[in-house]
């Protein structure tokens, strides 16, 4: 498991019982990913209504570098929706392009109040 992998995992519904298999992005650093059995991810959503927020990252699947991620629809990375899951429950799909990793770092700083 490595930082900025695009993965699939079961993400629980907010305010309701149940969960759904969804894409997510690993945000935990690689050293911790090697030493711990769980990892921290941020959820993705296809709901684009709040994509303009500073703690959210829009992913346009029509761009060449994003097509390789395996994402099927335009998505938003929700840096405000962190969760920790067992690595055994997480399935790697691909990795984010470098340009998006830098933008994701800025979204995480905004979500966590890190200047």
Image: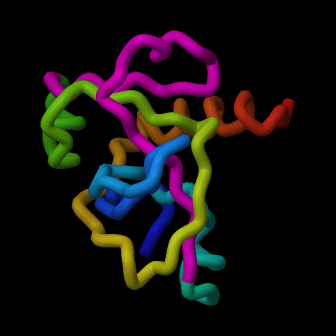
Q: Position of residue 61 (x, y in %)?
A: 19, 28
**Residue at the image position 33 percent from the left and 60 percent from the top:** 7
In the picture, which quadrant includes the N terminus? bottom left
**Residue at the image position 54 percent from the left and 26 percent from the top:** 56
Q: Quadrant of residue 4?
A: bottom left
Answer above or below: position of 67 versus 62.
below
Q: Is residue 104 left or right of residue 114?
A: left
Answer above or below: position of 16 versus 114.
below
Question: Magenta span has 54?
Answer: yes
Q: Position of residue 115 (x, y in %)?
A: 86, 30
Q: Is residue 107 left or right of residue 115?
A: left
User: What span is in magenta?
Assistant: 38-62
**Residue at the image position 52 percent from the left and 43 percent from the top:** 14
Indicate how the structure is coloured in the image: rainbow
> Which of 9 and 96 lies nearest the eye of the viewer?
9
Q: Position of residue 102 (x, y in %)?
A: 54, 37
Q: Position of residue 99 (x, y in %)?
A: 42, 34
Answer above or below: position of 101 versus 12.
above
Question: Magenta span has 114?
Answer: no
**Residue at the image position 34 percent from the left and 43 percent from the top:** 97
């Amino acid at each position: 498991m490595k930082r900025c992998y695009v993965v699939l995992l079961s993400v629980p519904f907010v305010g309701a019982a149940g969960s759904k298999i969804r894409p997510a992005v690993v945000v935990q650093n690689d050293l911790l990913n090697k030493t711990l059995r769980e990892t921290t991810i941020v959820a993705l959503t296809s709901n684009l209504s709040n994509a303009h927020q500073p703690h959210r990252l829009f992913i346009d699947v029509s761009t060449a570098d994003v097509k390789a991620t395996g994402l099927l629809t335009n998505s938003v990375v929700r840096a405000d929706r962190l969760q920790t899951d067992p690595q055994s429950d997480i399935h790697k799909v691909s990795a984010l392009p470098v340009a998006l990793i830098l933008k994701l770092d800025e979204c995480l700083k905004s979500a966590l109040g890190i200047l």
